[in-house]
Amino acid sequence: MAISIMLDAGHGGEDPGAVYQNRSEKDDNLALVKELGQILSNNGIDVQYTRTTDIYQTPFEKAQLANNAGVDYFISIHRNSAPTPNQYHGVETLLYDKSGIKLEMAENINNRLSEVGFENLGVKARPGLVVLRRTNMPALLVEVGFLNSDVDNEIFDKNQRQIAQAIADGILETLQMQPADVNSDAAPLPQLQDEMDPGSPLYRVQVGLFRKRSNADQLLYELLERDYPAFMLAEDGYFKVQVGAFRQLGNAIAMERRLRRAGYATLITT
């Protein structure tokens, strides 16, 4: 049976991710994921995707897609962002923890990307990230250069196919040295339950609204560390920190009450 990998193009839809000049992270992520998926498919990998178009999904929805599909690996493609343009450049890969086959794969991917021209910033543990914490299989989040780095953007734009090939080579290099059963180092998975009705709106609980991304990041990391399904939207010049994406209003109300008891100021939005 072929190894299966779910590829995730980070952000999407109403969530552009990082933005620099006229460039949105979500677009770079999707373009690279499509290139990467084609290469992996050509090498016998069963490739699935969280998205192939410009749609929004919460991090929990992305993790649940991978879990429901029962894939062997989950790989999320992103681009990084620094507080100040051209402050940093380079690639790094984030993991739930630095152990197991996912660490070997992350190191191989970073090494291959450095051959394309990116600086290798290493592998970092980031247990608070939902797509790394809530997936049932080894999961990686690859930050393919900084979106607000002119150096990294030049590398990205001139070498997109080579970048996709480098990531694929890092993956394939790891798989050639490992058995097919690779699910033993998965992170724990508490599931968020909510009835799904495609015709109903999504209800979210907003916890913060900020002009400065650094302030929004601080609240976001605090909520993730406290095990809330939090995420951030960049919209209308503001950074919005929200929790959950519920089809049923009652579930959103229950989450809002929980957050208020914890001391947060909240409102329900759609």
Image (cartoon, grey):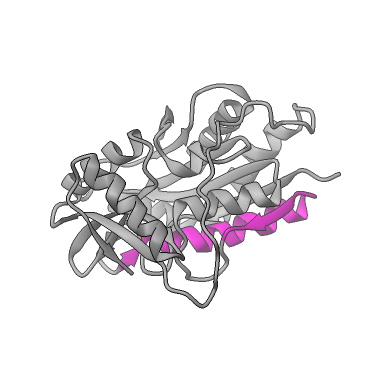
Tell me what residue is drawn at x 53 percent, y 58 percent.
32
Horizontal relation, residue 114 to residue 230: left or right: right
From this viewpoint, which residue is outermost toward the top?
Answer: 99
Answer above or below: position of 182 versus 13: above
Q: Quadrant of residue 232?
A: bottom left
Horizontal relation, residue 50 to residue 182: left or right: left
Q: Looking at this view, is 67 or 77 the one in front?
A: 67
From this viewpoint, which residue is outermost toward the bottom?
Answer: 199
Our reading of the magenta stretch's main secondary structure is helix
Tell me what residue is drawn at x 48 percent, y 70 percent.
54
Q: Looking at this view, is 159 or 57 the one in front?
A: 57
The quadrant of the rendering that contains the N terminus is: top right
Tell me what residue is drawn at x 55 percent, y 48 percent.
63
From this viewpoint, which residue is outermost toward the right?
Answer: 1
Position in image of residue 67 (x %, y %): 63, 46
Horizontal relation, residue 143 to residue 2: left or right: left
The quadrant of the rendering that contains the C terminus is: bottom left
In the image, residue 133 lies in the stretch drawn in magenta: no
Horizontal relation, residue 177 to residue 166: left or right: right
Q: Looking at this view, is 248 or 37 the one in front?
A: 248
Position in image of residue 114 (x %, y %): 48, 37
Q: Is residue 208 visible?
A: yes
In the image, residue 36 lies in the stretch drawn in magenta: yes
Magenta segment, which residues?
23-50
Position in image of residue 100 (x %, y %): 61, 23
